[in-house]
Amino acid sequence: METVEMNSVSLKRPRSEDDVANADEVKRQKILEKSKAGNDSGQSIETVTEQPEDTKSEIIPNEESEEQEEEELEDSDEDGDPESFADMMKHGLTESDVGITKFVSSHKGFSGILKERYSDFVVHEIGKDGRVSHLDDFSVPVDDEDPSEETFTVLSDEDKQRLEELQLFKNKETSVAIEVIEDTKEKRTIIHQAVKSLFPGLETKTEDRDGKKYIIAYHAAGKKALANPRKHSWPKSRGSYCHFVLYKENKDTMDAINVLSKFLRVKPNIFSYMGTKDKRAITVQEIAVLRITAQRLAHLNKCLMNFKLGNFSYKNHPLKLGELQGNHFTVVLRNITGTDEQIEQAMHSLREIGFINYYGMQRFGTTAVPTYQIGRAILQNNWNEVMDLVLKPRPGAEKGYLVKCREEWAKTKDPAAALKKLPVKRCVEGQLLRGLLKYGMKNIISAFGIIPRNNRLMYIHSYQSYVWNNMVSKRIEEYGLRAVPGDLVLKGATAVHIEEGDVDNYTIHDVVMPLPGFDVIYPKHKIGEAYKEMLVADNLDINNMRHKIRDYSLSGAYRKIIIRPQNVNWEVVAYDDPKIPLFTTDLDKLEGKPLPVLPTDGKFRALKMEFSLPPSTYATMAIREVLKMDTSIKNQTQLNTTWLR
């Protein structure tokens, strides 16, 4: 994960003990009153939401699959009122729980609200050639092979539904007949083109029936045809992949691709990208798709909200994960309290020194069972504990159906009974329960293996991150912001120790530290021993990080301990209305929206900042360094007075 998935948080300095005590009493009263009234209203994780923006949603196809219903359940909110959510988040993690304890700057911290509106957080991908992705062109490359615009309108909604059901094998029909009204050769040609281009995997032929002409659609090559768009329909002179810029609002990358694939009636795996981007943000990134024309993609701009597609081109290669230089962030921190001097000190320090390259809070989960604990149990080969940690009841903010599922599991230890309480089967809990049903309680390893590989590896990567954060905090505490003998630096891809005579050739910005694994070396000073001690305390052997199951063998990696952002710029602006945007987006510019007019002396002040970061770094950790505040949801929900309004 190379960008931050961050919900709206108000980064405020702590109140006095009296304030907190009074606030807790008010909360208790509100919870009591609402529970008496039988209040069952929803509350999302965001502590500050801006309603008008969130009412936008993409149009979905008429046919609702089980998958779509699950997505709606996952997006729905049934976790109670704001106060009860804040109370539940008391069981979550704070930064110190995951080793995030140090700062590198000396300025005094100040308060500000991050992501009061999702449009306050904008991410532009930086490609491997150093070019920043922007949406600035809706035009479609001219291509004689493209079908006419009439292709998209010639089929009725009823025809499209029947063809989709045929394409997806949703009924027992082997073909669909479409009557040709106003029969001409040109009209028949357009219908043939429409079926083949809009419904990959279907072939067509013309038949005479009772003196009328019909276009018959049928399957070309079984179910595989849907996943493999027909090769013969693609011009040889055109690159096989259509690359485009995806501009999205308040949607993560995989959700966006799932929506696009449903509209295009193709499998999501024909899309490729270089990195996943935030949900609660505006993000701009490059996507590639196999053998879908720019014309078809551009047509989606007419029916989708929260997405725009543009900057189309044809190339002969897909995109690969990790093939990017990083991301450029534009962030607004609203209602800041810092003086101009504090802000200048903070931003100069960010530009000149940087920030500690901690793994951010989203790496470790938001509930009372951190993901690193499950990762540690996997590495210990303690599969009963893995099962218990994933399925047992836990305090904290969770959806109601998950709570019921966990309670059923604790009561019966019956996978079938617990699964019945779970309408969303694709979650980790549902997948593990299905695995236990299939393989039995005595084969937890195979049951756990049903969970997709990337999700399983997330747990052990979380444990590595937990160790790394703790060790870096110890390293900063012990040796400060200078390179010392025994530290590690990279020579190419190889890590070497800094020797006494070479120490003046390096700065803190050269120093790396290892994520534990079988293919890394450790510092030759106190911190090297600290790694061993930490793993021994967790019943792990630092010299034997190979696991019986190959997937869970950790090779390790190296990570810079300090990151200095590039292209750092900032300004303080005044504003009166918290709902107005404070800068223009790519889409605003394309649509000709003017810059917002801001007062010279407004009620509130905001810090607008821009910076570029390499992949696998967390923007929240840069913002933490500026504000000197704990970015955990637990801390912010307890400090944020918005909950009490």
Image (cartoon, grey):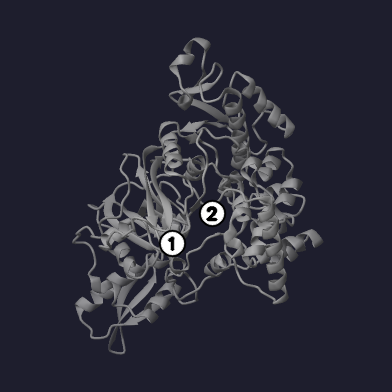
Using the numbered discs, state the Cα–Cα distance from disc 2 to disc 1 in whole angstroms.
14 Å
Amino acid at dot 1: Pro
Callout 1 environment at 10 Å: few (<14), some (14 to 19), or many (20+)?
A: some
Give SS at disc 2.
strand
Callout 2 environment at 10 Å: few (<14), some (14 to 19), or many (20+)?
A: many
What residue is shown with label 1? 578
Q: Identify which residue, 109 or 224, lies in the foreground.
A: 109
The image position of residue 554, as x and y in percent, is 60, 34
Residue 329 appears in the figure: no
Q: Identify which residue, 303 or 366, lies in the foreground.
A: 366
Q: Is residue 271 above or below residue 355?
A: below
What residue is shown with label 2? 10
The image position of residue 321, as x and y in percent, is 43, 44
Which residue is painted at 47% across and 54% down in the image?
A: 335
- In the orientation shown, which residue stands out farthest toward the right? 411
Give SS at disc 1.
loop
Which residue is painted at 72% across and 40% down in the image?
A: 381
The image position of residue 286, as x and y in percent, is 35, 50
Residue contact between numbered discs 2 and 1, judged by CB atoms under 8 Å: no
Which residue is painted at 54% across and 68% down in the image?
A: 72
Residue 584 appears in the figure: yes
- Left/right placement of residue 343 relative to residue 497 reads left
Q: Identify which residue, 35 or 127, lies in the foreground.
A: 35
Q: Is residue 611 above or below residue 22?
A: above
- Left/right placement of residue 455 relative to residue 128 reads right
Q: Is residue 376 above or below residue 434?
A: above
Of labels 2 and 1, earlier in sequence is 2
Amino acid at dot 2: Ser
The image position of residue 260, as x and y in percent, is 40, 63
